[in-house]
Image: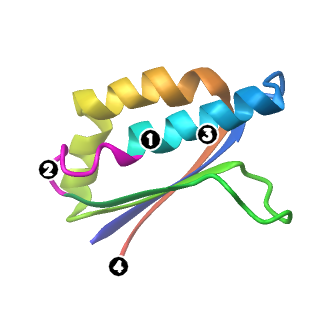
Amino acid sequence: MVKHVILWQLKDELSEEERTAVKAGMKESLEALAGQIPGLLEMRVQTEGLPTSNAEVMLYSVFTDAQALAGYAVHPAHVAAADGYVSPYTKNRLCMDFAE
């Protein structure tokens, strides 16, 4: 199995109300990908970190293999979620992919 973990920081100019709405949109749109993409086994989005966190949103996903992860990256449903609900509102993205 391949794990795909992303951490995002939201853009500084977003108000607290906007941040709340953006986080909800990210969570809803990304978690909705479960069952739509071949090889995607699990998709979770965490939007409430502890005060010690320096990221505001985390994506944790599990794929059958690296080929499934590569297919996810270009899948139209994923691209639509990323372009509509993630990229316009984030300033920083960190990613770690690993096999277990």
Within the image, what quadrant is residue 100 found in? bottom left
What distance separates the C-alpha of mark 3 from that of mark 1? 9 Å
- Residue 14 in percent (x, y) is at 78, 24
Residue indicated by mark 1: 28
Q: Could you tell me what secondary structure mostly forms the magenta stretch?
A: loop
Mark seen at residue 91: none
What distance separates the C-alpha of mark 4 from that of mark 1? 27 Å
Asked whether the residues under the numbered discs 3 and 1 touch, taking CB atoms below 8 Å apart as contact, a structural biologist would say no
23 or 79: nearer the viewer: 23
Identify the amino acid type marked 3.
Answer: Lys
- 4 or 1: tag closer to the N-terminus: 1
Q: What secondary structure is found at the residue carrying circle 3?
A: helix
Asked whether the residues under the numbered discs 3 and 2 touch, taking CB atoms below 8 Å apart as contact, a structural biologist would say no
- 4 or 3: tag closer to the N-terminus: 3
What distance separates the C-alpha of mark 4 from that of mark 2? 19 Å
Category of crowding for the residue at label 3, using alpha-carbon neighbours closer than 10 angstroms: few (below 14), some (14–19), many (at least 20): many
